[in-house]
Amino acid sequence: MSEDNKDDWGMTMPHQRLDDETREAIENGDPLPAAPAAADWETPANPAPAPGDFDKTTPNIRFDSDLPADDWGSTGTRNTSEENKDNWRMPEPVFRISAGETPRFDRRSDLGDDDFSEGYGTPPGSDPVVADAAPQEAPVAKKSGNGKLVLILVGVFAILAVFAVGLVGAYLVYFNQNSEIRSASNTSAPTPDSTSSETKPVAMPSVAALPQSIDVKGPMVLVDAGDFMFGSDNGPDESRPAHSENVAAFYIDKYEVSNAQFKEFCDATGRPYPASQDWDREYFTARPNAPVIGVSFNDARAYAEWAGKRLPTEAEWEKAASWDASKRVKFDFPWGNSFDKGNAAYDLSSPSDVGSFPGGASPYGALDMAGNVGEWVDNYFKAYPNASGSNPNFGETNRVVRGGHFGSRSSENLKTTKRSYIPPDFQPTHDQPSYIGFRCAISANDPRLGDKLNK
């Protein structure tokens, strides 16, 4: 090989024509004869082709015009005889797809021009690919178990959604039914800190439709539902501070319980009469319209239960005695802020008959809530919320008494915010007179009222 042309050649394996001896050895499995001395390399008899006539990536195909058409790159002695034509073993040709035409889809596929998937053709604009030498089976899509899982999850979600909607609907029905009861009183019934005979409330007329007065073992007046100013910032420490308190609608006795009413209770239940008073031994029996006195807290509660009512809470009592709902004004006395001795049984030697001072009526129409006799309420003597002062008698032992009494010497004791306390087991005797009586109350939505609210 000349030094000048050595870089123009690309080396390929020489191709040797099989002679009869070599072919026979191959067919019989015998050792091959020795290689010919002259290989198909550059020789004078086989000069190097000119640059550009040789494709370095394909078999050595000679393009000499004197080569026969079936001579595929042979470099040995040409043999074109008819009898030797079957001795040829043609190598598998490698076909190249013309760069001028790009297949858009595989003919084995029924996909259209715009449907392409892995193994089914080449999308437009992609590089040419070598065609398969033999047909292949089209891949079969595998079925996945995810579809069943999705269906199960969707079903479970649907069931939960229906269940949730049902719960919401049931709640709304329940809420609407109970809202009718709440709207009648604007708040729940009072919950005193002691046992009460109240039963669960039932549906009742709206507040506007409630009668202003009813009769349950005596006349009672309506106190509407809502908040009011409870306590006072100007009174003693046990009455401080003034604060808003919400109270449900209720009825309260227009008058204090009289001797005649309490005697009826004692005769019906066998309870002893109250102890006589030193200043008037015949007070209980001789004065039936005077307020009963000489009764303990337990006596008062027992009567209220027998009459189908209860004792008022401290907040109920104060609202009924002092609050003007139309003006939203709190009074120091049931009739106003100025004391008037002519409106109350005050600084006397004995009580007056109930209702003797109509000028002293509260805004709701209750009488004798200042003076005459002190009144038990159903609360312990405790400090108000956020109270700054203290009292050694606070706690859950002493009960609250409101309203002053006929023997009071100071009008301060008759104020609607004044609080007094007495041990609940206090039992008056002949030697220890008592000036304490009571009145009753009942919630406006108490079922015991029955048809009384519909008259």
Image (tube, rainbow, N blue to C red):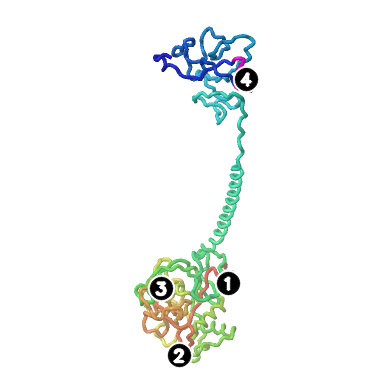
Instruction: Measure the alpha-carbon separation of dots 2 and 1.
Output: 37 Å
Residue 32 rendering spot, x and y as whole percentages:
59, 21
The residue that mark 4 highlights is 25
Q: Earlier in the sequence, mark 3 or mark 1?
A: 3
Residue 417 rendering spot, x and y as whole percentages:
40, 75
Q: Label 3 is placed on what type of residue? A: Tyr
Q: Earlier in the sequence, mark 4 or mark 2?
A: 4
**297 with respect to 267 (left or right):** left
Q: Please give the count of numbered marks on the rendered protein.
A: 4
SS type, badge 1: helix
Over which residues does the magenta segment extend?
19-31
The residue that mark 1 highlights is 448
**153 with respect to 374 (left or right):** right
Instruction: Measure the alpha-carbon separation of dots 4 and 1.
Output: 127 Å
Q: Nearer the viewer, mark 3 or mark 2?
A: 3
Instruction: Measure the alpha-carbon separation of dots 4 and 2.
Output: 149 Å
Looking at the image, can residue 350 be seen? yes
Q: Residue at x 53, y 26 (%)?
A: 122
Q: Label 2 is placed on what type of residue? A: Gln
Of helix, strand and loop, which mostly describes the magenta segment?
Answer: helix
**For the residue carrying disc 3, how many other residues have a C-alpha within 10 Å: few (<14), some (14-19), or many (20+)?**
some
**For the residue carrying disc 1, how many other residues have a C-alpha within 10 Å: few (<14), some (14-19), or many (20+)?**
some
Q: Earlier in the sequence, mark 3 or mark 2?
A: 3
**329 with respect to 141 (left or right):** left
Instruction: Measure the alpha-carbon separation of dots 4 and 3.
Output: 124 Å
SS type, badge 2: loop
Instruction: Measure the alpha-carbon separation of dots 3 and 1.
Output: 32 Å
Q: Residue at x 59, y 44 (%)?
A: 150
Instruction: Measure the alpha-carbon separation of dots 3 and 2.
Output: 31 Å
Looking at the image, can residue 359 be seen? no
